Image (cartoon, helix red, strand yellow):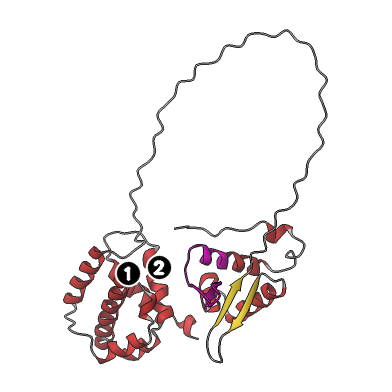
Amino acid sequence: MNRFFKLYKFLFEDDKYKDIGLNSKVAYCVYRDLIQQNRNVKKDKNGKVYIENPRKYLMNTLNVSINTVTKIHKELNRVGLIKDVWDDVGKPNIVYINYCENPKPQVIHKTYEMVKVEEKKEEIKPLEVKKEPIIVPEIKEELVEKITDKDLEDAQKVLKEYKVGKIDLEASKILKNIKLYLYKAKEEELIKIAIRILVKKKREEDRLELLKKITTYEVSYALERCKNSVRNEELVINKLIKYIETKIEDINYWN
């Protein structure tokens, strides 16, 4: 999994794209990365790949306002780097990415032949180079990357600590707002456990209204944060719950 975004040189060298803002160039690179990582992408009936609900993802990734994202999309559409499509009234837009990278012609510099000078050739003996063993440092950090059976076992233990039984009415309402079919089986099971625990916690805090803000976007955001983190003594289920709570309690996010 890449821990960086690739910045394309043609965005700065091609005259067609020199006038668009730096935010727009970075946003295009973020969208290209999404497709390369096969995240938040789908295929239309013609088999063409597109990004679903890209504006909200860009707001969160670049930490910018919706007005800034609107300006970015206008610039990228104008120069043909992306194509916005609105499926239906009231539904989030989708965006197609155009691959416009064209390598610049190679500049061949003229070289001049050096005047040959006759010199007495001396025999050069090869130097003996002592080869030292290459020591590769051991990488102890392990990324989560995917949910395992061990994660589910740990999550069940946490669930029992909260003394939560079957999914109650509040949890069922929240799960209806989440497109569980988008996730793998183990991810879906982990999400269901997290929602049960959140209902229990917010009920005790008398803050059940806050849970109405949980949608597929908040859950996907939290899950990606978990899968980009390092496995340590903190359980994955605890991280998932923490990231969902942080997202729905973020005042700036909801204002």
Identify the image quadrant of residue 122.
top right
Magenta stretch bounds: 30-52
Image position of 62 (left or right of 148): right
Say above or below: 88 vs 23. below
> Is residue 56 visible in this depiction of the protein?
yes
- Disc 1 residue type (three-letter): Lys
* The magenta stretch spans residue 41: yes
Asked if the residue at tag 1 contacts the one at tag 2, i.e. Cβ–Cβ closer than 8 Å, the answer is yes
C-alpha gap between disc 2 and disc 1: 8 Å
Residue appearing at x 57%, y 65% in the figure: 32
Residue 239 — which label?
1
Residue appearing at x 53%, y 16% in the figure: 127
Residue appearing at x 33%, y 72% in the figure: 240
> Dot 2 corresponds to which residue?
225
Image position of 249 (left or right of 150): right
Residue 255 location, x and y as percent?
A: 50, 86
